[in-house]
Amino acid sequence: MANSLNTITVDGTTYNAAAYEASKPKETKANDDLGKEAFLQLLVTQLQNQDPLEPQDNSSYVAELAQFSSLEQMTNVVKNLEDLGKVVNNIDTSVLVGQLSSMIGKQMDWLETINEADAEGNPVSHQEKMTGTVSGVTITDGNPNIVVEADGEKYFVDIANVAHVYDAEPVVE
């Protein structure tokens, strides 16, 4: 029996790894990752089931541990990149809020969606052009909104609905 990385021992019988994998029924699992525990269980099982007369070379275990260590490091890099992406998004939102804050005191035109019911009670919506004075900026559910005062009411306007921003015309007395 040859000692090779391309063999696998199952229930005391050694198989060629490629042939064994090809003979197994394919299982599909959605996003199941092998974690540290699964790897260690696999390694312990492999140690327990090796042929005592021809034990596997220690260098193969070291190679497996090195591969696992590399995989773990790559997983950590991916997690750190995801965290960095969140930080960048927060910075982008902060910069956007700063830019939107420069609009305070200016006039703004925007499209407001009006939801009503028709004569039969069916929901009907239409858009209406509104004009008001920007009084602030707020973040709602992670999205910046512009606070606009018009006709004695406050409106929270999504940036996508802004049509025009301009300086208020001076009042001539």
Image (cartoon, grey):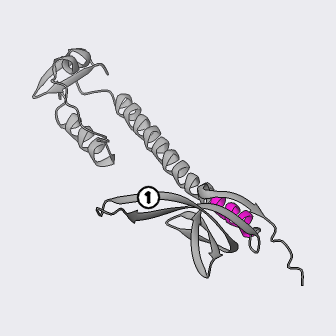
Q: Residue at x 21, y 17 (%)?
A: 22
Decide if residue 53 is in sight here.
Answer: no
Q: Nearer the viewer, residue 41 or 165?
A: 165
Q: Main secondary structure of the magenta part?
A: helix
Q: Residue at x 38, y 29 (%)?
A: 59
Give the quarter of the image for residue 162.
bottom right
Q: Residue at x 37, y 33 (%)?
A: 64
Q: Nearer the viewer, residue 1 or 83?
A: 83
Residue ranking furthest to the right? 173
| Coordinates of residue 131 in the picture (x, y in percent) | 67, 68
In the visual, does 102 lie left or right of 16? right
Q: Report the span colored magenta.
A: 91-101
In the visual, does 127 lie left or right of 28? right
Q: Residue at x 28, y 62 (%)?
A: 120
Give the quarter of the image for residue 68.
top left
Magenta run includes residue 154:
no
Residue hosting label 1: 125
Residue ranking furthest to the bottom? 173
Q: Amino acid at mark 1?
A: Ser
In the visual, does 114 lie left or right of 7? right
Viewport quadrant of the C terminus: bottom right
Viewport quadrant of the N terminus: top left
Residue ranking furthest to the front? 119
| Coordinates of residue 58 in the picture (x, y in percent) | 35, 31
Magenta run includes residue 100:
yes
